[in-house]
Amino acid sequence: MSPSEVMPRALAAVQSSRGRPGGTGQVTATLADEDRGPRRRDPVRWITTLFVLTFVIQRVATPGVSEVPIIVPVTMVWLVAALRQQVVRIDHRRLVLWLVAAAVTALLAIPQLLLDRAPYVSVTSWAFWMVLWLPMVVHLADRSAATYRRAQRAIGSAGLFLSGFSVLFIGVQLLGLGYRDFVAEYLPSSLQVQGFIITYPISYGSSLYKSNGWLALEPSFMSFMLGVSLICALLAGMHLVKVLWIALGLLATTAGSGIAVVAVFVVVLVLTGRAAVLRRYALPGAALVLVFGLTALGESVFSRVNEGTSSDSSTSLRAIEPYSYLWPRWISDPASVVFGAGAGASRQEVTGSAITGLLVPNVAKVFFDYGVVGGVLLVAVMVAVYLRSPDLAVSLALAASMFTLQAAAPALVLCSLLTVTLWAPVDRSVGRAWRMPRGPRWAGSGGPKRMVRR
């Protein structure tokens, strides 16, 4: 509240309180309550809170459903509360798309059960996927350039916190203390999310384990969240030391998911003429990567550059082998091609494959489970998550990962929703009146702070 607004409202409050017992004593409380309202509705606080919670409680399961992380119901509570506080509003286009996709994929169970040779329909699998993407139906009420930049800085600052866990995880091992899974030791097994490889040695026979910061479900999840934090820190123009600290935490995971996100982000910046964002970080960042490459951790990371050519590599098990394995099984039944093999059928097939580490990426899952009819709609839902965003580099970097390498896990989906979807479409009043130099719309470059009138 500006000073010009405070005085008239204070005088009005004093005048209206005269004649009431203790009336003037309530003026300060009244003004304080009015000031707290905007703070409670500050979207940056809401976004940062959910981002941090996504990391902190990532391994905690929903009671009674060990395969569903508790962050899923927590996100639904967050969504309802944000709607009540008017932090977010319904995006009617995305709502209609989500409702149509949910209805059609649910009804596909009928032809699947009637026509498929070996139908497998899991209501839980269908509900989990639809609920996971449900927050796409809202956008923030305040999507201004200033708020977006504050959110980038806040997520970058949260990355400092995440990076601390990642570096500490490796540090205690280098000190000879050895790896211990404290979450598994102190959290009852019934409350631990199942079905994930929490961590594993950086190489065969090594005593050094990949960093998941103890709290992430996998090192790849830790890497992905740190990658998102790093690109936000770069766009926000955060201090060099802070950016390098986040980068160090990212490298400490020795997982490629976050590195891939940052790599696509950098390529898009260069291709769109926004390389100036990286200028102050380029040389120190290159030095960090060079020094890191001389360590055992660095050797583990850089040895994976050409791993896609190996059938048992992490990249191949995410981007190549799932399609090679599922494709012949999908096309063997015409009914499956059209209507799908059933919700959760792809995971059932992969589980029975005896191929360790085989993952079902999003595109393979939706077409195998729901056929061409449902798959097209669910892909449209995913595409809508990344459309009309304020920053092309961020949306393309995350979309490239989610469409090629990742499965629909809460930690990964929420990163896209919090940094892209909730900010789309770009506020028209801002987009028409202002633009950042050398950047798309108003969220272009992290360096220049000057706003240019169109």
Image (cartoon, grey):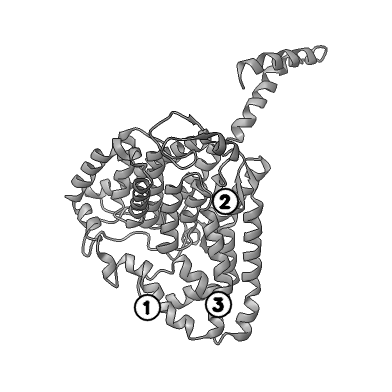
| Residue at the image point whose x is 57% and y is 46% from the top | 425
- The amino acid marked with disc number 2 is Val
Q: Considering the image in quadrants, where does the N terminus appear?
A: top right
Farthest residue in the right direction?
19
- The amino acid marked with disc number 3 is Gly
Residue under label 3: 340
| Residue at the image point whose x is 56% and y is 83% from the top | 335
Distance in Å between CA atoms under marks 2 and 3: 31 Å
The mark that comes first in sequence, 2 or 3, is: 2
Foreground disc of the pair 2, 3: 3
The mark that comes first in sequence, 1 or 2, is: 2
Under circle 2, the secondary element is helix
| Residue at the image point whose x is 48% and y is 76% from the top | 348
Residue under label 2: 74
Farthest residue in the left direction?
294
Instruction: Say which mark, if any, is on residue 354.
Output: 1
Distance in Å between CA atoms under marks 1 and 2: 34 Å
The mark that comes first in sequence, 3 or 1, is: 3
